Structure formats: C-alpha cells, structure tokens
C-alpha cells in the first residue's frame, strides 16, 4: 500500500514537471515569434531581428533586416518614439515608418495655412476623403492594401501650394506634443496606408523615403512582416 502511494505521488510530480516544461516551451515559442520588445527610449541603433511594441495600441510585431535602423521619434515630440497613439522608427537617412492610432491622437490640424498656429480638431471618420480634399496635399488614386492580414487602402501624398521655402504641412497632432508632418522635397511623395479596423480602431501607416525606386521595397518588406499581436 505504502509503495503504491509513493509511486502515485511520483507519477503526479512527473506529470506536473512535464506540464510546466511544456508551458514554458510554449511561452518561449510565443515570445520568439513576437521578438524582442522595443526599447523604452530613443536608441541610436536597432540590431536586425523581430521586435514587438510595448505601448502602441493595437500591439504589433515586425521584422527589420540589415543595419542602420534606429528608434527615434519625430522632431518636436517628447520622450520615447512609442506611445499608445504613435510609433516611429527609421533606417538612417533612407526611410521612416510611422504608425498612428487615430482614436488616441489629439486630432488632426485644420485645413489652414501650413504656418498657422492652430489647434487640432477631432479626426474625421472618413480619413481618405480628408486627405483628398486637403488644400496643401495632392493624393494619388487610392489602391487596395493589406498589412498584417487587415485590408485597407494606400495612396501617395505630395505637398502643393506652399509658400516658398516651406516643405511640410502639419497632419496629426500627437499626444505628447508636436505634429506629424507631410513633407515634400523634390517631388518625392510619401505613402499613406489607411486601415479602418485593426482590432476595432483605425490605424494609419506612413512611410517616406529619399529614393522611392530604391528604398520603397525596404519599407514594404518591413510592412509585409507585420503581425497584429495580443497584448
């Protein structure tokens, strides 16, 4: 009887140990799929690999390939380049990729002059139309786009009708202060992707490049690796 009891206890302990190991393995596999967390503050360089967000909503993971990627926010922002309403990262002097949660932004800037000090207003429900009717933006015809399995539309944006020496227009008002801008230098448009429903919220993705023909594939490869993840 005592021998049987000891054997039963041993079997239970072995089963618990195997279960724990299995859970740890599953958790480790899930963590590997998400990659490493993005740093909490600006970082001069990001090594090649897969990363996942820690603050941006909705959460996502993505992969960057090659060197010269850095984690840095736009000029005029405070703190780190990731907040619930925005995420910025870039490949040095080549391409910048930005994500925006439109619901969590302070809003959009009115369609006034690019140099006016104006307060943001709530973002419109129809973002694509807002871009198309902006007096300082010229947009291409929207085309279907998919990021992380979520369907939306994409279009190129160039700035027009600006005063001499002005290259940028305020677009989104960020929660931490300062704007996200649309800029045009030498007729080099930026691309915007509008996803109306990512886990119930609208998300806008923007990327701008210095040499579209050469570096658009760099940005597109990153976006092809995006996965919308669980918190």
Image (cartoon, rainbow, N blue to C red):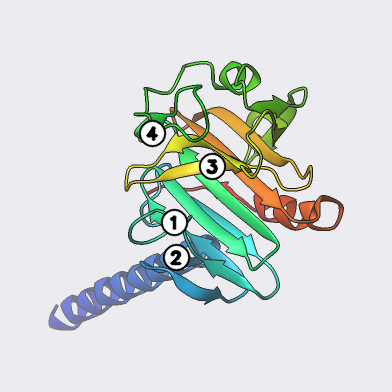
- Quadrant containing the N terminus is bottom left
Report the Cα–Cα distance between label 4 and label 1: 32 Å
Please tell me whether residue 47 is drawn above or below residue 78 in the rendered image: below
SS assignment at label 3: strand
Q: Which residue is mark 4?
A: 117
Report the Cα–Cα distance between label 1 and label 2: 6 Å
Instruction: Write the residue at 47% across / 51% down.
Output: 87
Q: Which residue is mark 1?
A: 53
Residue 105 placement (x, y as % from top left): 37, 35
Q: Quadrant of residue 47?
A: bottom right
Please tell me whether residue 85 is drawn above or below residue 210 in the rendered image: above
Mark with earlier residue (4, 3): 4
Residue 127 placement (x, y as % from top left): 54, 22
Instruction: Write the residue at 78% across / 51% down.
Output: 216
SS assignment at label 1: loop
Mark with earlier residue (3, 1): 1
178 relative position to 138: left or right: left
SS assignment at label 2: loop
Q: Which residue is mark 2?
A: 38
Q: Nearer the viewer, mark 2 or mark 4?
A: 4
Q: Which mark is residue 181?
A: 3
Instruction: Write the residue at 65% across / 19% down.
Output: 132
Q: Nearer the viewer, mark 3 or mark 1?
A: 3
75 or 32, nearer to the observer: 75
Mark with earlier residue (2, 3): 2
Mark 4 neighbour class, 10 Å CA radius: few under 14, some 14 to 19, many 20 or more: few
72 relative position to 212: left or right: left
198 or 141, nearer to the observer: 141
């Amino acid at each position: 009887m005592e021998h049987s009891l000891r054997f039963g206890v041993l079997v239970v302990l072995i089963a618990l140990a195997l279960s724990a190991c299995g859970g740890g393995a599953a958790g480790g596999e899930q963590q590997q799929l998400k990659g490493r967390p993005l740093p909490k503050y600006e970082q001069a360089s990001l090594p090649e690999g897969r990363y996942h967000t820690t603050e941006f909503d909705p959460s996502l993971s993505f992969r960057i390939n090659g060197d010269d990627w850095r984690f840095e926010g736009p000029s005029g922002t405070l703190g780190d380049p990731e907040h619930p309403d925005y995420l910025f990262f870039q490949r040095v002097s080549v391409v910048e990729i930005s994500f925006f949660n439109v619901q969590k932004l302070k809003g959009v800037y009115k369609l006034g002059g690019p140099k006016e000090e104006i307060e943001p207003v709530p973002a419109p429900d129809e973002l694509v139309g807002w871009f198309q009717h902006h007096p300082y933006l010229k947009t291409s015809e929207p085309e279907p786009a998919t990021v992380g399995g979520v369907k939306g539309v994409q279009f190129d944006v160039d700035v027009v009708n600006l005063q001499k020496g002005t290259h940028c227009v305020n677009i989104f008002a960020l929660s931490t202060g300062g704007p996200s801008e649309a800029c045009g230098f030498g007729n080099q448009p930026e691309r915007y992707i509008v996803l109306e429903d990512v886990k119930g919220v609208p998300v806008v993705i923007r990327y701008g490049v210095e040499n579209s023909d050469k570096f658009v594939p760099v940005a597109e490869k990153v976006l092809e690796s995006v996965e919308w993840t669980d918190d």
